[in-house]
Amino acid sequence: QVQLLESGGGLVQPGGSLGISCTASGRTGTSGTMGWFRQVPGKEREFVAVIRWSGGGFSPHYADAVKGRFTISRDRAKNAVSLQMNSLKPEDTAVYYCVAADSRLIVSRLWSGENYDYWGQGTQVTVSS
């Protein structure tokens, strides 16, 4: 069984930066897919970014809403994934959930949370002045 433990998050002003991280304990290996979704109360969860093993290296995928502002990275040795968020906007405010899949998901399956096997507890990110 895999457990995902998130860290980071908090309050930041618009235009600021924040990093969140997630460490997986268990059997999720390099071939798995890891990343982040987010959810605002009353709204559906939203894909943010994931990173997967592809072509001999890690390949990131981003939602259009965060492309160019967020950077996802993976530490193979620590079995961890991080999300660096820059130029934050109030609309980025949400609970951010770490996700992981045992297998390397094909691109068409990255966007739906239903395709991920494990979820973290979530960490709150609030962008406000």
Image: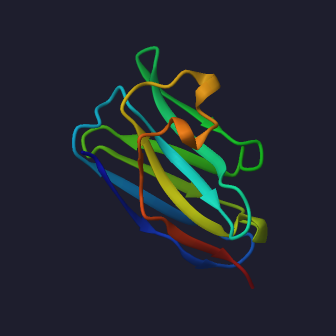
Query: Would you say 117 lies left or right of 3 here?
Result: right
Residue 95, image x and y in percent? 58, 67
Q: Quadrant of the N terminus?
A: top left
- 5 or 16, which lies in front? 5
Query: Would you say 43 lies left or right of 108 here?
Result: right
Q: Residue at x 65, y 54 (%)?
A: 45
Q: Residue at x 51, y 62 (%)?
A: 19
- 69 or 79, which lies in front? 79
Evaluate whether residue 35 shows in this view: yes
Query: Would you say 45 lies left or right of 90 here?
Result: left
- 28 or 43, which lies in front? 43
Q: Quadrant of the C terminus?
A: bottom right
Up-down: is 58 above or below 98?
A: above
Up-down: is 49 above or below 54?
A: below
Q: Residue at x 59, y 32 (%)?
A: 110
Evaluate whether residue 17 shows in this view: no
Residue 9, image x and y in percent? 51, 71
In the rendered image, the residue lying farthest to the top is: 55
Q: Residue at x 69, y 52 (%)?
A: 69
The image quadrant that residue 43 belongs to is bottom right
How many marks do you count on the picture? 0
Residue 32, image x and y in percent? 38, 31
Query: Would you say 123 lies left or right of 67 here?
Result: left
